[in-house]
Amino acid sequence: MILVFAVAIGIVVAVARGGDLHRLVGLRLRFGWLALLALAAQVYVIYYPAEQVEGARTLHAAVMMGSYAALVVLVLVNRGIPGMPVIGLGLLLNLAVMASNGGYMPVTREAIIATGTRSEAELPPDGARLPRSKDVLLPADQTRLWILSDVITAPRMPLARIYSIGDLVVATGVVLLIQVAMVPGRYERSLETGL
Amino acid sequence: MEMIERGGWEMKRVHHLYVKVLYAVIAIAALAMAAGAPEGWPMP
């Protein structure tokens, strides 16, 4: 939910800084439909029947990686928009750890139990996918690029979750993107001058 | 008549404006949700 909060917080902060929601119309987000396509692909993977996820593992990993490839294209095409390079960096951090661990975001059993989102009894064995998520359950010593996986636990937040460094970078980029899109300033000057 | 036509045009313009704003917000939210991968997403 941190990523949905980032959009809401970005809008609230921008309005507090004198920004206008209508200015989002001026945001030249090319290929924005790729974001919707990527999200739709991921929703398919995440909400696939929980008892069948292991059977579709290879297909789902390919769909998941394909959706991230679409997002990389979206970020590259829009790299001139301030905030987009930061989102791109977070995206690549998540992509790196997911691609090196079979196409899913690794998370440890201990981290999930610490946040209280699922009990020990609800968790599958190590190496299995977590139903209704992008995650795979892996011990830290079996996780490649472990530091980039879901390691940041937030049990005291209203919606307890486990985040990766990439998630926080994406959230920062989203807040930044909304600021430059809604608050008058540098962004439209760069559009006017073509720089 | 001209007033009505102008009013209709203004309504259409406002309508398009809100659709564009909504599209931008949805696209940014979709990008954020798809780029990130917090455990439990997107469960409530």
Image (spheres, coloured by chain):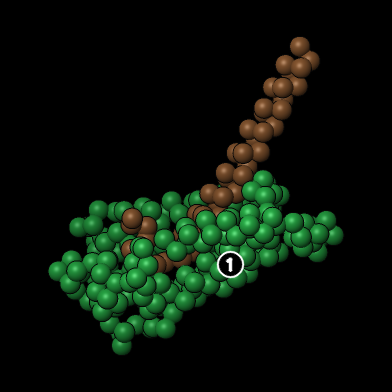
Chain colours: A green, B brown
For mark 1, what is the residue? A173
Task: Please name the residue shown 14% across and 69% down the image.
Answer: A121
Q: Is residue A130 left or right of residue B28?
A: left
Task: Please name the residue shown 83% across and 56% down the image.
Answer: A192
Task: Please name the residue shown 27% across and 66% down the image.
Answer: A117
Q: Which of A124 and A189 is in front in this view?
A: A189
The picture places residue A186, in percent across and down from the top left corner, at 77, 63
The type of residue carrying mark 1 is Gly
The picture places residue A184, in percent across and down from the top left corner, at 74, 56
Q: Which residue lies furthest to the front in this view?
A: A16
Q: In this view, does A130 lie to the left or right of A147?
A: left
Chain ID at mark 1:
A
The picture quadrant where one finds residue B18 is top right
The picture places residue A43, in percent across and down from the top left corner, at 38, 53
Q: Give the structural element (helix, strand or loop) at label 1.
A: helix
Where does the N terminus of chain A fall, quadrant-wise? bottom left
Q: Which residue lies furthest to the left in this view?
A: A121
Residue B25 seen in render: yes
